[in-house]
Image (spheres, rainbow, N blue to C red):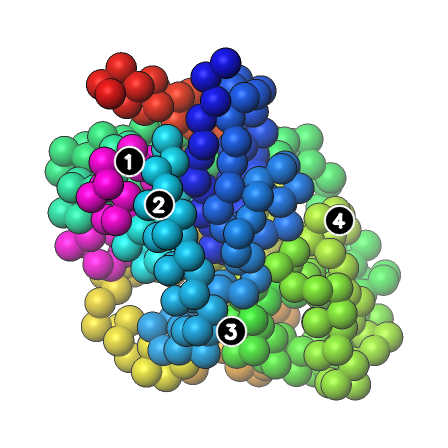
Amino acid sequence: MNVKRVLIVAGEASGDAHGAALVRALSRLRPQWRFYGMGGERLRGVGVQCLYRLEDVSVVGLVEVASRARAVFSAFRGLRAALRERPDLVILIDFPDFNLRLAKYAHRLSIPVVYYVSPQVWAWRRWRLRLIRRVVDKMLVLFPFEAEIYRNVGVPVDYVGHPLIDEIPPPELCPTPRTEAERALSGPRIALLPGSRLSEVTLILPAFLEAARALRKSDPRATFLLVQASTFPPDVLQKRVDDAELNGTVECIANEKPWWNGVDLAWVASGTATLETALRGVPLIAAYRVRPLTYLIGRLLIRVSHISLVNLMASRRLVPELIQHDLTSAGLVRRTRELLADPVRLQIMRAGFREIWDCLAIDGTAAETAARAVLSVADTAEVSS
């Protein structure tokens, strides 16, 4: 039996989910493989021996990383030591500031590296393409436009489809949105998705909660769902709701539950959650805020006109974006009222979401396609050794 030891590293909630689906697919094809490394609840749930927890290292921003520096450096040193024990293969999932450094070390040890979920080289730090070409044996990307970027610079790449398409049916099979008349009878129902990292929640959630308070004051029938990522213990966001004295106004719900049913609009921290929300047919406002210094540095480096994946995929401003200083409770309330009062705009938004779904759909599942690409790298390395 050809037992292979695979080091897999995910540092964010979305990477944890993508990694778990990939491990399940690989385990069906190669049940003798053994997986270990760093991940969260989902990777642990599919049998990965997690030497380090992503909950301890997940952070966003060039400045914010300092708050978790000790945990991040400890995990990096430990995983670098694990590489010295020569696993047969390394699978790195997103989390580029951390994972590209691991990729360099694995390359020096001649360990094959598969990178799943591309760094956002199309948005900033394009110089990373030179490093990726040198240290990554295969890049697996989720968006068609990313594959073209890598092919143009000579990086081996496969477009494997987006894992969300495996989970989310076509829009016409999703629940029908509530009509304007139905909303008028019971009041608007709004979902709050403030992010999967503590740093995001700390900076974004206060504006969400204050906007919920303001909307509730003008329409006491309005209801709110606060969607909590799996990276947090169950009571983390509930405590913030309690501290804001919004108990009875804002209900906390786990991300794994079907929070989108009957939701008229969502306020979403920019990231994978914006794409998931759109693919489920829920109109949304994308929001983001980081520390001031991180924002100033980002302004100098980022080279895209939109920050949300929805608008990037649509190549236009399909959904509103409230970024940094524009992310205020007053801004959220104003945009929310404008959208809910404009059924034509909501219809245009949902039509755009369907276009995105069609663009991302592939034959088979993303996890299976990615697993076959991983196997091709492993088989090639075995023949070469």
Against 249, residue 184 (above or below) is above
The local secondary structure at tag 2 comes to helix
Given residues 292 and 356, the one toward you in this image is 292
Kindly report which numbered mark, 3 or 1, lies closer to the viewer in this rendering: 1
Q: CA distance from mark 4 to mark 1?
A: 39 Å
Note whether residue 52 is visible: yes
| Observer able to see residue 278 | no
Residue 302 in percent (x, y) is at 26, 64
Give the amino acid type for the residue marked by disc 2 in the picture: Leu
The spot of residue 337 in percent (x, y) is 63, 70
User: Is 63 within the magenta?
Assistant: no
Q: Which residue is mark 1?
A: 111
CA–CA distance in space, label 2 to label 4 = 37 Å
How many marks do you count on the picture?
4
Sequence order check, earlier mark of 3 and 1: 1
User: Residue at 56% of width from left, 71% of height from top?
Assistant: 198
Residue assigned mark 4: 257
Q: Say whether disc 2 or disc 3 marks the residue closer to the N-terminus.
A: 2
Q: Regarding mark 4 in the picture, which secondary structure is present there? A: loop
Task: Identify the mark at residue 199; answer none if there is no mark.
Answer: 3
Which circle's residue, 2 or 1, is located before the other in the chain? 2
Would you say residue 104 sits in the magenta stretch? yes
Q: Which residue is mark 2?
A: 83
The answer to whether marks 2 and 1 mark residues whose Cβ atoms lie closer than 8 Å is: yes
Decide if residue 147 is on the left or right side of residue 183.
left
Residue type highlighted by circle 4: Lys
Foreground disc of the pair 2, 3: 2
Highlighted range, magenta: 103-128
